[in-house]
Image (tube, rainbow, N blue to C red):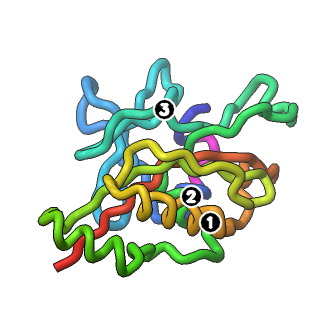
Amino acid sequence: MRLAEHAAFLRCLAATGLRVEPARDPQSAPSLVDTAGAELVLDVRDGMVQQILGGPGVSPKPAWIPAASGAAAAGAPRESADTVPSAVLDAHRIAGETAIVPDPETKSAIAHAGSPRLIGSFKLCISARGTVTNVTRLKSTGSPAYDRRIERAMYRWKYSPFTIDGEPQPVCSAVTFIYSQR
């Protein structure tokens, strides 16, 4: 896919509040920038986007870029879900609570432990129809009860189908939860 030529990709970016920033110099790569100014660097080789790399504070991870040729572009069925940035998937969420807090017993345990901040990461996969098909814990919050609560809530999330060139696609993304209590 040539970045500037793939209209569906650019429309998807615009719909999620992302824009393409050209390379600052011949040695650097173009990047995606969101409305808050966070930047994701693109891996571009021979004018083709290969993957989306991490930005500040984000681990590098491949992300799916729509193919301009080959089986995927020809409409062949895709066998596995691709990874998309969480900002892209967030824009498709139509139902489900995202402010997931621990139950009172867990809150009390957190207070007694003296560590008022919990951070956990989960991989979320959705079907071409927009239903959650899988939630995998990547990094525990440190509280098994809170991890289970997050996982149950994520399974209740609903999404509008993620489409590329008008075809619904299954996708996955990483979601990070940060809970702080005073």
Q: How crowded is mark 2: few (under 14 residues within 10 Å), some or many (20 or more)?
A: many
Look at mark 1 in the image and give the residue it sits on. 92
Q: Does residue 114 lie above or below 97 as drawn?
A: above
Q: How far apart are marks 3 and 1 (CA)?
A: 20 Å
Q: Can the viewer see residue 8?
A: no
The amino acid type of the residue labelled 3 equals Pro
x 36%, y 33%: residue: 60
Q: Position of residue 115 (x, y in %)?
A: 16, 63
* Label 3 – label 2 distance at C-alpha: 15 Å
Give the residue at x 80% y 58%.
129
Residue at (73%, 60%) from the top-left corner? Answer: 130
Indicate the amino acid at tag 2.
Answer: Leu
Residue linked to disc 3: 62
Answer yes or no: do the residues labelled 1 and 2 have beta carbons within 8 Å? yes
Sequence-earlier tag: 3 or 1: 3
Q: Specify the segment rendered in magenta.
A: 5-10
Q: Where is residue 16 in the image (x, y as percent from the top left)?
A: 52, 63
Is 70 situated above or below 146? Answer: above
- Label 3 SS: loop
Q: Does the magenta stretch include residue 130?
A: no
Quadrant in the picture for the N terminus: top right
Q: Do the residues labelled 3 and 1 touch (CB within 8 Å)?
A: no
Looking at the image, residue 161 lies above or below residue 104:
above
Observer-nearest of 12 and 4:
12
Tell me which numbered mark, 3 or 2, is placed earlier along the sequence: 3
Q: Which residue lies furthest to the left in this view?
A: 114
How many numbered discs, if any?
Answer: 3
- Residue behind mark 2: 89
Dominant SS type (magenta):
helix
* Mark identifier at residue 145: none
Q: Position of residue 73 (x, y in %)?
A: 78, 33
